[in-house]
Amino acid sequence: MTPLLTSTRHCSQKEVKKKKENKKGFKTISMTEKFSCRAKDLFEILMDENRWKVFSQSNAKISKERFGSWPDGIDSTVRFTLEEPEPRLTVVKLTHSDIPEEDRYGNVTVVENTERGWRDLIFQRRRAGFGI
């Protein structure tokens, strides 16, 4: 099936498909989530700054977000692909690449924390905030 909408954004996560190694010291997270809404509506929620603030409870836009604990100069890439296999059912495929394996303090939980953040803080808040 061809994705209806695809957006690639640069930034400074219910099913996890795989974690694969990119370049040395970096990982990729791939996740799939289902939402009971039209792909167009979900796309607007992802891209509209005011709607982003509602569900992320943050003024940060995804295009500028990066973890402060990451080493300086590290930026990752987030790619959302939205598919609508049937009316009012949207499948979101997220790929977050170039995640450092450890932060500037030597903590090795960066990938797990990033994955948990997508799942719990972004996707679950979107469901609660917009009823989707």
Image (tube, grey):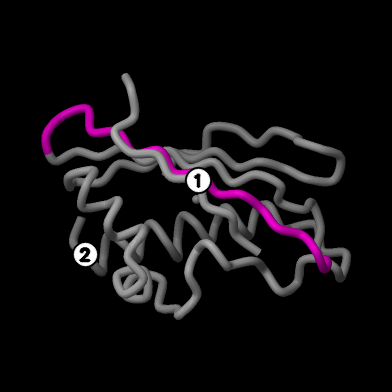
Q: Residue furthest top?
A: 1
Is 105 within the magenta? no
Query: Which image quarter: residue 18?
Result: top right
Q: Position of residue 43 (x, y in %)?
A: 30, 51
| Callout 1 secondary element | strand
Marks 2,1: beta carbons within 8 A: no
- Relative horizontal placement of residue 44, taking residue 62 as reference (left or right): left
Residue 19 image point, x, y percent = 65, 36
Dot 2 crowding, Cα within 10 Å, few <14, some 14–19, many 20+: few
Image quadrant in which you'd find residue 56: bottom left
Q: Is residue 1 above or below residue 27?
A: above
Which quadrant of the figure has residue 122?
bottom left
What residue sits 70% from the left and 58% below the top?
A: 75
The residue drawn where x is 50% and y is 50% is: 13
- Real-space CA distance between mark 2 and mark 1, rounded to the nearest whole angstrom: 23 Å
Q: Looking at the picture, which amino acid does disc 2 mark?
A: Phe
Which secondary structure is most common in the magenta stretch? strand
Query: Quick one: label 1, few (<14), some, or many (20+) residues within 10 Å?
Result: some
Looking at the picture, how far across and down is residue 49, in whole percent?
36, 71
- For marks 2 and 1, the one nearer the N-term is 1
The residue pinned by badge 2 equals 130
Residue 84 within the magenta-colored segment of the rendering: yes
Task: Give, as a single range, the part of the protein colored magenta.
Answer: 71-87
At x 50%, y 46%, the residue is 8
Residue type at numbered disc 1: Thr
Helix, strand or loop at disc 2? helix
Residue linked to disc 1: 8
Q: Return the residue found at the far left.
A: 87
| Disc ID at residue 68 | none
Q: Position of residue 78 (x, y in %)?
A: 55, 49
The residue mark sitting in front, 2 or 1, is: 1
